[in-house]
Image (tube, rainbow, N blue to C red):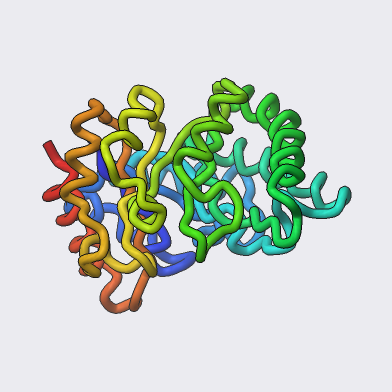
Amino acid sequence: MKFAVSNIALPAFDHLSAFPVLRGYGFTGLEVAPSRVWHGSWDAAGVAAYRRAAESAGLAVVGLHSLFFDRPELGLFKPAETRLATLDFMTGLSALCRDLGGRTLIYGGGRRRGEMPVAQAMDETRRFLSELLPRMEAHGTMLCFEPLGPKDSDFLNSAAECRALADEFAHPALGLQLDAKALVENGETGEETFRAVKGRLAHFHANDPGLVVPGSTGIVDHAVLGARLRAIGYDGWVSSEQRMLSEAGALADAEAGGRTLLRCYGS
């Protein structure tokens, strides 16, 4: 397996100097939250510079997450005009991912259905994906709905639900991702969950509740999850999804997260 770290672990808008240090902690990949790099929009020169800084430090951009952090007005279940804006925004994110050298877009927030019945929410999602996925396919990127616990979302919570949607579409731009804390919250840490995604899993988030340093809460048994991934022959990216708890301690926390990944997910 290959190890990445999210840039939400680093100071916003000023973290390029940390890249060489991260490489020394055992990370070879960087997962990017766009709102941690750009104020609302980006341009080709800025994207190229960010990619160059990462790759010069020996870090490959693996993809994007935290897609809607600074765009709460967008999302799946919105009025027609906002829905079109969401499609355009997601298409732009897909192109950004491509230009950074990444592949996966992890779709976590921005999908609360509220009072909308599940069947209607599924129909809306099918319609949305039918328009979005052909746009993404040209970029060579892959959208993955992130399984989330019931506190974080009220739609597509489980790994099984996300897999069923991917099975239904069978489209190269729609993939599968697993999330450590969500597996625990949803009771899906068993072997059967991993066997069901064997050969198809595109990305894995190693995290703990609250997105603190992975392994620091004792709630998530990362050693067991690492063994589950090895058992299905997964050799893709495991990303340490941890937020910056303090600017002064950001690098020390990132190093601690890297130790958890090496210990629990390493061969």
Residue 244, above or below 33: below
* In this rendering, position of residue 219 left or right of residue 164: left
Identify which residue is drawn at 75% across, 55% down: 116
Rendered-image quadrant of the C terminus: top left
* In this rendering, position of residue 105 left or right of residue 127: left
Residue 210 percent coordinates (x, y): 38, 69
Residue 98, above or below 77: above
Residue 141 percent coordinates (x, y): 54, 30
* In this rendering, position of residue 262 left or right of residue 45: left
Residue 168 percent coordinates (x, y): 60, 25
Residue 142 or 30: which is nearer the viewer? 142
The number of numbered badges drawn on the structure is 0
Identify which residue is drawn at 69% across, 24% down: 134
Residue 205 or 192: which is nearer the viewer? 192
Identify which residue is drawn at 38% across, 29% down: 197
Residue 258 percent coordinates (x, y): 20, 55
Residue 159 or 28: which is nearer the viewer? 159
* In this rendering, position of residue 61 left or right of residue 136: left
Q: Is residue 64 visible?
A: yes
Rendered-image quadrant of the N terminus: top left
Q: Can residue 240 be seen in this view?
A: no
Identify which residue is drawn at 48% across, 54% down: 148
